[in-house]
Image (spheres, helix red, strand yellow):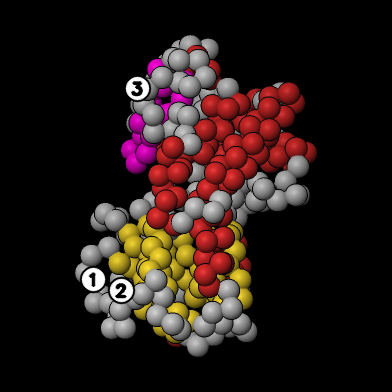
């Protein structure tokens, strides 16, 4: 799933190619992808793009005095840029194509989604805050207002485990399964540690690990074409997706805990005092 660093890079990639350009057509190819009906997608057609922004894991394409096209790529969605798109509309229900945005000039991008679980979402909204997922977002961890004091206030009284808290978009916007693993590894903390149990020193350590991990990932992703971002994300991971491989910090074997619909990776030596965590399928821990 694209998370904050990849979505930030995609926003920059699109801004370079869309701002000032006129949207010619917005063509859904999968009925399930469109989550709104008022205003219609056609309201964006003929309008110039004024900005491309990120809200958590959401991409927001703003048009001149018109609607916002908002995308959430979910677990298996992606954006593919084309210097030349066919003039004929895509045929609905064929292959991974979910939505096509064609610019005046013939270039543009497709939103695609692999697999059978269709979760990619497209919204046409008057304001980004009209999108329920954006309205529920917590603070952005790269915003100036996200200070140590603000972070500590979010954790105060939070009885859930750190892994679940970091992934909760209503607490902090933009962090998913992969970067929560990376942040906790950098902080040398167990994913099952209760957030409310952190001392002031541990809270400061986690805050620093969170900011450093995300900022470094954004810098690695910046300037890469959309087609390169998946590989770039994977290459920068130290524990996530590296089950059975040596930890790059201590050399211990990276372990995994599986759940009903996801898994987490961690280093026992760095994070749990050398003790492997029980690998039990309790999806409620990550809700």
Relative to residue 82, is residue 64 drawn left or right? right
- Secondary structure category for the residue under label 2: loop
Q: In front: mark 1 or mark 3?
A: 3
Relative to residue 12, is residue 204 drawn left or right? right
Identify whether 119 is placed above or below 163: below
What are the residue bounds of the magenta stretch?
Answer: 253-267
Mark 3 vs mark 2: which is more N-terminal? 2
Which residue sits furthest bottom?
46
Percent across and percent down for residue 247 are 45, 21
Mark 1 vs mark 2: which is more N-terminal? 2
In front here: 7 or 21? 21
Give me the residue at 54% from left, 79% from top. 21
- What residue did someone put label 1 on? 93
Which residue sits furthest top?
274
Identify whether 216 is placed above or below 122: above
Cα–Cα span, label 1 and label 3: 39 Å
Q: How many marks?
A: 3
Label of residue 29 in the image: 2
In front here: 218 or 137? 218
Give me the residue at 60% from left, 64% from top. 53
- Can the viewer see residue 164? no
- Can the viewer see residue 56? yes
Cα–Cα span, label 3 and label 2: 40 Å
Give me the residue at 68% from left, 27% from top. 205
Identify whether 248 is placed above or below 183: above
Percent across and percent down for residue 37 are 44, 79
Q: Are marks 1 and 3 in contact (CB under 8 Å)?
A: no
Q: Residues within 10 Å of mark 1 (few under 14, many from 20)?
A: few
- Secondary structure category for the residue under label 3: loop
- What residue did someone put label 3 on? 244
């Amino acid at each position: 799933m694209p998370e904050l660093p990849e979505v930030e890079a995609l926003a920059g990639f699109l801004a370079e190619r869309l701002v000032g350009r006129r949207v010619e057509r917005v063509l859904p190819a999968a009925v399930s992808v469109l989550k709104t009906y008022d205003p219609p997608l056609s309201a964006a057609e003929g309008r110039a793009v004024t900005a491309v922004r990120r809200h958590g894991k959401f991409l927001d394409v703003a048009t001149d005095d018109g609607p916002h096209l908002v995308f959430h790529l979910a677990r298996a969605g992606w954006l593919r840029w084309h210097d030349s798109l066919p003039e004929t509309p895509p045929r609905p229900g064929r292959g991974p194509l979910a939505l096509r945005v064609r610019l005046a000039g013939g270039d543009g991008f497709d939103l695609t989604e692999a697999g059978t679980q269709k979760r990619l979402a497209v919204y046409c909204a008057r304001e980004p805050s009209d999108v329920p997922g954006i309205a529920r977002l917590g603070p952005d961890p790269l915003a100036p207002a996200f200070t140590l004091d603000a972070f500590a206030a979010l954790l105060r009284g939070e009885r859930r485990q750190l892994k679940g808290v970091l992934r909760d978009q209503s607490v902090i916007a933009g962090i998913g399964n992969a970067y929560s693993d990376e942040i906790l590894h950098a902080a040398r903390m167990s994913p099952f540690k209760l957030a409310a149990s952190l001392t002031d020193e541990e809270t400061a350590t986690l805050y620093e690990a969170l900011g450093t991990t995300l900022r470094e990932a954004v810098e690695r992703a910046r300037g890469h074409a959309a087609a390169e971002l998946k590989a770039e994300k994977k290459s920068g991971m130290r524990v996530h997706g590296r089950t059975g491989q040596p930890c790059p910090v201590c050399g211990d074997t990276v372990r995994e805990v599986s759940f009903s619909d996801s898994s987490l990776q961690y280093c026992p030596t760095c994070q749990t005092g050398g003790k492997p965590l029980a690998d039990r399928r309790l999806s409620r821990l990550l809700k």
